[in-house]
Image (cartoon, rainbow, N blue to C red):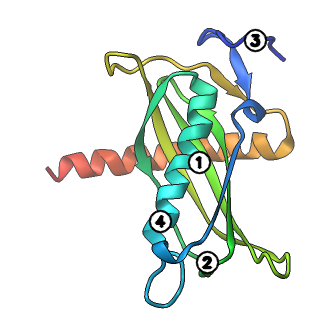
Amino acid sequence: MLIYSAMSSPTTGRPVRDSASEISEMALPTHANPLGNLLGGRVMHLVDIAAALAAMRHARCSVVTASIDHMNFLYPIHIGELVLLKASVNRVFTTSMEVGVKVLVENLRTGAVRHTSSAYLTFVAIDEEGKKIALPQALPETDEEIRRYQKAGERRKIRLEMRQQAKGKE
């Protein structure tokens, strides 16, 4: 385990736990669809915010969203329920990092909690002039963090292949 400070250099790292971020918000009628459920776009917005917070906690600089993997909505989120989003950095590459976000919903009357969706987002760290900068590595410590670290490498390979294919179609 490497010791670090708030000013760690890119050659050292930060534990994944230091990037962990949680936000919560009640599903309100202003964000509902005609069926009385939270709009999917609102969920995606909250996912981007939760992921950005985790990315900035790790990078300690400005970050921009580079990509969002697909999202499946497993269950609707009803108005009046509490939306809980948990995010952390899964892995750092050179100037980019993958952040995982898990979306849960809690029925405040019963206390029942359900997993409603998950997403993986890629963020790029930038300096004051908008140029990419190198990041400190994410240091996984638990078995779950190590598993997510390894899977992030597999997902990155797929993302890069898809990006190349998209560029070839231009």
Q: Which amino acid type corresponds to the residue marked 3 in the rendered image?
A: Tyr
Which residue in the protein does label 4 denote? 42
- On the question of residue 39 being in view, the answer is no
Which residue in the protein does label 2 denote? 77
In what element is the residue under mark 4?
A: helix
| C-alpha distance separating marks 2 and 1 | 17 Å
Q: Mark 4 vs mark 2: which is more N-terminal?
A: 4
x then y, percent, for residue 142: 85, 39
| C-alpha distance separating marks 3 and 1 | 24 Å
- Residue at the spot 45% in from the left edge and 52% down from the top edge: 68
| C-alpha distance separating marks 3 and 4 | 36 Å
| C-alpha distance separating marks 4 and 1 | 12 Å
In what element is the residue under mark 2?
A: loop
Quadrant in the rendering for residue 105: bottom right
Q: Which amino acid type corresponds to the residue marked 4 in the rendered image?
A: Arg
**Foreground of the two, 4 or 57:** 57
x then y, percent, for residue 44: 48, 61
Residue at the outermost bottom position: 35
Q: Is residue 52 left or right of residue 106?
A: left
C-beta proximity under 8 Å, tags 2 and 1: no
Vertical arrangement, residue 100 with respect to residue 39, above or below: above
In what element is the residue under mark 1?
A: helix
Which residue in the protein does label 1 denote? 50
- How busy is the neighbourhood of tag 3: few (under 14 within 10 Å), some, or many (20 plus)? few
**Foreground of the two, 112 or 17:** 112
Which residue in the protein does label 3 denote? 4
**Foreground of the two, 97 or 79:** 79
Quadrant in the rendering for residue 6: top right
- Label number found at residue 15: none
C-beta proximity under 8 Å, tags 4 and 2: no
